[in-house]
């Protein structure tokens, strides 16, 4: 998606910026830039009509210095090894930044899940899970949902792993249904975190969030509930979009009614009554207070960054802003709350889910949400404090904290042999 830098190039440039600020040596830089493991697997799929196609799946473990690897599984036609490597690297810095004991990973299958039946999706998922079983497990690498996957995908992965192990292993994935060891509050966690971090940035700039106008790109798991939470808190969500396009109403949309409309069978937000249709490109350039990109990477680039009118960009998605665009936004005074901070609520509650699974003792939704807020507020304070101290952007400060903690873990553990 987008033009200019690819996700992997962006991730490497961001790492170099953090390494330079931290004064790390070349050897450590190379170690941090290199994925620990990158597995490519073939995923043969028998379609319901009997014909067979071989899809390609990936699981990349970027870094394991601070604990088992953690990261989502993406089903998307454009998913390839470089995208998965970038997403895995961002997971490493994110887990370190919010202070949870994980390294970073990501996985994916190059497929459009919307074109598959439920039975085909189940077969893809079980075969993909079987192929990556040698490297996953509650102490090794714990997958979760991402673009194109959901609670049901995680249930099939958990079941596949458990059947092959011989007993139930709920801690092998997070983002599962509560009925099989999922956590209360996980479904809305990423979106809740997006709201918390948006409000922290607004508060810091002495802007009242009530009445703020918001545009959300990607009305999926993250964007849909982020729109709802922001609306419920008193913001005016004026535009949302999905892969088919966007809708706009300057007087504000009702995300709850829109979610209900989609659950009722509509296949897109486009065409929702009482709204104007806009493109995804137009949404990014709307004159709003807060822009929440919550779809894919590379949507704010050097091509359109100068036309972004929002004062705050809160990255629900991973990697939506390229490094070249970051420079333009910074020059224009736009505050970017970076992905590794803004969307870290998801992995935070995934961590809580894993802890609950390992202890076989479950918390209430209020306990989960309260602990999430503590982690997110602490991370925001750390990042904004370092940004002010060093005169760098929130992105560079967030990366410095994440990269710095992983570097410290490497130095402390030493290099084997
Ligand atoms: P999702 O599949 O639930 O939703 C994705 C949304 O983006 C859908 O509305 C889809 O139609 C839309 N979309 C897809 N391609 C698009 C395009 N080309 N242009 C515009 N819209 C497009 O996925 P999600 O889980 O909500 O993930 C969204 C982003 O948030 C991703 O970058 C993901 O890595 C990131 N993220 C997700 C989680 C999580 O817990 N699910 C956690 C942290 C970060």
Image (tube, rainbow, N blue to C red):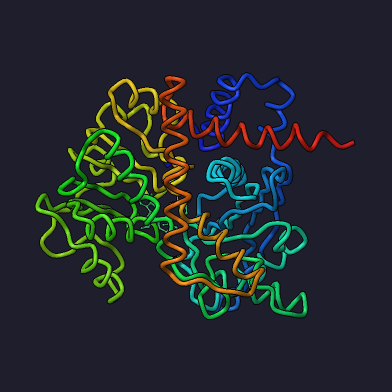
- Specify whether 245 is left or right of 96: left
Residue 387 percent across, percent down from the top left = 43, 27
104 to 404, vertically: above or below: below
- What x and y, as percent, mark residue 281? 28, 41
Q: In the depicted view, which residue is nearer to us: 36 or 39?
A: 36
Relative height, residue 270 to residue 201 (above, below): below
Q: Is residue 239 above or below residue 406?
A: below
> With 36 as the anchor, is 54 left or right in this view?
left
Tag count = 0
Q: Position of residue 300 (x, y in %)?
A: 36, 35
Q: Residue at x 61, y 60 (%)?
A: 143
Residue at 61% across, 64% down: 354
In front: 107, or 22? 22
Q: Quadrant of residue 66?
A: top right
**Quarter of the rendered structure image containing ligand 1:** bottom left
Which sits in the foreground, 2 or 9? 9
Q: Quadrant of the N terminus?
A: top left
Which residue appears farthest toward the right when viewing the image? 417
Give the residue at x 59% y 68%: 356
Q: Measured along the vertical axis of the image, is residue 178 above or below residue 381?
A: below
**Residue in front for this viewpoint, 89 or 179:** 179
Rendered location of residue 68, percent (x, y): 69, 53
Q: Quadrant of the C terminus?
A: top right
Left or right placement of residue 55 versus residue 206 in this view: right
């Amino acid at each position: 998606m987008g033009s200019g830098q690819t996700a992997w190039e962006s991730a490497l440039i961001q790492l170099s910026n953090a390494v330079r600020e931290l004064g790390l040596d070349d050897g450590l830089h190379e170690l941090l830039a290199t994925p620990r493991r990158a597995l490519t697997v073939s995923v043969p799929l028998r379609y319901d009509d009997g014909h067979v196609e071989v899809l390609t799946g990936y699981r990349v473990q970027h870094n394991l210095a601070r604990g088992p690897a953690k990261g989502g599984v993406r089903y998307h036609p454009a998913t390839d090894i470089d995208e998965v490597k970038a997403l895995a690297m961002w997971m490493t810095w994110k887990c370190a930044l919010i202070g949870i004991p994980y390294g970073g990973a990501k996985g994916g299958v190059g497929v459009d899940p919307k074109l598959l039946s439920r039975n085909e999706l189940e077969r893809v998922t079980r075969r993909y899970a079987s192929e990556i079983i040698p490297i996953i497990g509650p102490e090794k690498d714990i997958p979760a949902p991402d673009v194109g996957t959901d609670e049901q995908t995680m249930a099939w992965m958990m079941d596949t792993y458990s059947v092959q192990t011989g007993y139930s292993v709920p801690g092998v994935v997070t983002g599962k249904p509560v009925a099989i060891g999922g956590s209360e509050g996980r479904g809305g966690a990423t979106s809740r975190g997006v709201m918390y971090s948006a409000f922290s940035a607004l508060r810091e700039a002495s802007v009242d969030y009530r009445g703020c106008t918001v545009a959300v790109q990607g009305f999926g798991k993250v964007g849909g509930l982020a729109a709802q939470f922001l609306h419920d808190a008193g913001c005016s969500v004026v535009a949302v979009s999905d892969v088919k396009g966007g809708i706009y109403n300057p007087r504000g949309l009702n995300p709850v009614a829109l979610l209900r409309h989609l659950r009722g069978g509509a296949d897109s937000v486009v065409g929702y009554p009482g709204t104007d249709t806009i493109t995804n490109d137009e949404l990014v350039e709307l004159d709003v207070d807060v822009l929440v990109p919550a779809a894919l990477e590379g949507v704010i680039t050097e091509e359109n960054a100068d036309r972004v009118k929002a004062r705050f960009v809160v990255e629900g998605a991973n990697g939506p802003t390229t490094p070249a665009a970051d420079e333009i936004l910074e020059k224009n005074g736009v505050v970017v709350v970076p992905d590794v901070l803004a969307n870290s609520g998801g992995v935070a509650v995934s961590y809580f889910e894993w802890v609950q699974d390992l202890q076989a003792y479950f918390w209430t939704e209020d306990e989960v949400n309260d602990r999430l807020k503590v982690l997110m507020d602490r991370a925001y304070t750390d990042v904004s404090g370092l940004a002010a101290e060093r005169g760098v952007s929130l992105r560079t400060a967030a990366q410095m904290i994440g990269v710095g903690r992983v570097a410290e873990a490497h130095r402390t553990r030493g290099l084997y042999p």
